[in-house]
Image (cartoon, helix red, strand yellow):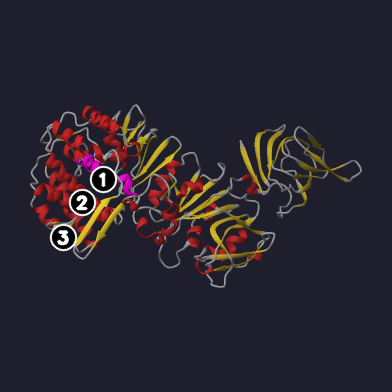
Amino acid sequence: MKVVRKPWGKEEWLEFNDQYCYKRIYLNAGERTSFQYHEKKKETNYIISGEAEIWLEDDAGEIQKTKMGVNEFFTVVPPRKHRVVALTDLILQEVSTPEVDDVFRIQDEWGRSDGKIDYEHQNPAFCIIAAGKGTRMEHLTEHIHKGLLPVEDKAVISHIIDKVPIEFDIVIAIGHHGDLVKEYVTACHSDRNVIFCDVDNIDGEGSGPGYSLRACSHQLHRPFYFCVADCMIRDDLPPLATNWLGVYPTGIPELYSTVKFDSENNITDFTNKCPEGFDHAFIGLAGIVDYEIFWDRLGSNSEVVAAFYDPKVYPSFKAHHLEWVDVGTIDGYLKVRNNKFSLPKTTGEAIYRTGNHCFRLFPNGTAENRHLRSENLSGLVPDEICASKHVMRYDWFEGETLYKIDDRNVYRGFLSWCKENLWSDPVTEIEEEGIVKKFYIEKTFDRVKQYVDKNPIELSMVNGKELCTINDYLNRIDWGERCVWTKVWHGDLQFDNVVYNGEEFRLIDWRDSFGGQLYWGDVYYDLAKLYGGTLINYNLMRDTNNISLTTTDDSVDFFCKHTNELTRTLPFVESWIAGMGYDLDRVKILTGLIWLNMSPLHEQPFSDMLFYKAKEMLADVID
């Protein structure tokens, strides 16, 4: 089926041959076709839904206007003049002779001339400007592009793409973290025709949205939408019927480009970041029909808004008030991010859901290793896993995490499941040397340094007890090679990574490697992850209101405000670990090391709580 976009709606060409053309025609309420005639083409139109006013020339040359509705039809014999006015949203079926370019327009609101218009027979385009660094997002965009930040289980850029009609070409300008954007969009939107355009200057002289858009200009010599990568709207996308800008009320015009328009929404003036500006901000979303005028007005400007400083040069230029979600600043993003999949770490790892699939983004390029590791976890992790370098996809497993379920019997059932399915064929030695040094010792000291660099004063009084420095405890640990190696291990075995549907457990977010080697992992590390997740409910910690942390010049006191069933299973967990013959003290030491490693990757106050909770744990075992 061929789709032809029209300023009043669209046509779907269901059949076109040398004998006839069969179309389904959609007109938006309040719109009208051109007032026209044909020299050869004869057509019959049948109304499927909606109401219309039909203008049709009679035998005497007079134009008769007739209201018609569902199941009524009319026939146009050349060269009679005619027009269709949509009183409501309207769907017609048209069958005609094959002279589809035989059109002579007498009157047309969009300035179209006679016959076929080339761009009407092209797919229109939707361009997303996703090349910049997103510096207003501060640390959140250090490892991930701002368009890939998750909101309501989807990346921001997916919220944008999902608004675009399926027949549109999607053109994306990429630069900063462009490889991540490309992999994510290719994986999550494989049903769309996406064209990526590389931007070679994202932060040098002359860079900016205008420069990025010009990098896509060879794809945009046709009517198109453009949108910045952090612009989310709740409304449907307005039709590409005329030039328009998306606007939203603002009381701080000095921060935005602002738009002035009359009572009929015709734009009359435009200014950029001016205290004396107007009361509606341009949100970064626009529809451009007169693309030749747009490109001429943009010229070599780095700011795309330069094309709008004289709105009167456009034949028609409208303002569309849209329900805008500003996720372009860190405050705006944090305000709207209410998804259950968040970004708890500073590494940029993110999780999304699209339909029946889960997508995981790993900016550090470990997705392929996780895919390989899933072979040893077959039946314990979700099905149909595939991966590129940075993106992994697998089937969505419907259920809830154990943290969400918070049922003591389910926790105990999971421990039995672990004993039955994990850590099979353990050995005490493997061929690779230096893994303990690399994974436990070097990594821990490096992460402690990261934390201390941010928090140079280490407090000595922890919950009323005088403790040594963290380095003193680390230097007193027996780092001996007391590992129990297995190929069936998870690597982050805490209860946010276990999903239960009432019958089966599935593990998610397994580790990509252990100390750089792919398959072997330490059973003690899994046990420590599980033990630490029992002591601290990481799901509750996402809400910092659940953390009470008070510091003075030399002391820190903290506790979790809420407890749950999991906390009360701790004695059972400890006896379960000991009952399998494992050293509980070693599990506790590794738990402390895990918290130390986590501490610089999280925000305050959780970061401080992890550091001092680790210090407290190590003191209990070592002292």
**In front: 136, or 234?**
234
> How far across and down, in percent of the image, does residue 477 sit?
9, 49
**Quadrant position of the N terminus in the picture:** top right
Q: Is residue 548 positioned above or below 94 on the image?
A: below
Secondary-structure class at tag 2: helix
Q: CA distance from mark 2 to mark 1?
A: 10 Å
Mark 3–mark 1 Cα distance, whole angstroms, equals: 22 Å
Q: Which residue is mark 3?
A: 460
Q: Which residues are magenta?
A: 528-542
Q: Specify the farthest residue to the bottom.
A: 276
The spot of residue 325 in percent (x, y) is 50, 54
Residue at image mark 2:
613
Q: Residue furthest right?
A: 60
Q: Earlier in the sequence, mark 2 or mark 3?
A: 3
Asked which quadrant contains residue 47, the reply is top right
**Tags 2 and 1 in contact by the CB under 8 Å rule?**
yes
Please tell me how crowded label 1 is: few (under 14), some (14-19), or many (20+) other residues with Cα within 10 Å: some
541 part of magenta stretch: yes
Q: Which quarter of the figure has residue 13?
A: top right
Question: Which residue is labeled 1 in the image?
Answer: 536
CA gap, disc 2 to disc 3? 12 Å
**Front-lying residue, 409 or 305:** 409
From the top left corner, tell me how far across and down residue 241 is, in percent.
Answer: 65, 51
- N-term mark: 2 or 1: 1
Residue at image coords 53%, 62%: 304
Q: Quadrant of residue 586?
A: top left
Which residue: 40% across, 52% down?
178
Q: How many marks?
A: 3
Any part of residue 520 in sight: no
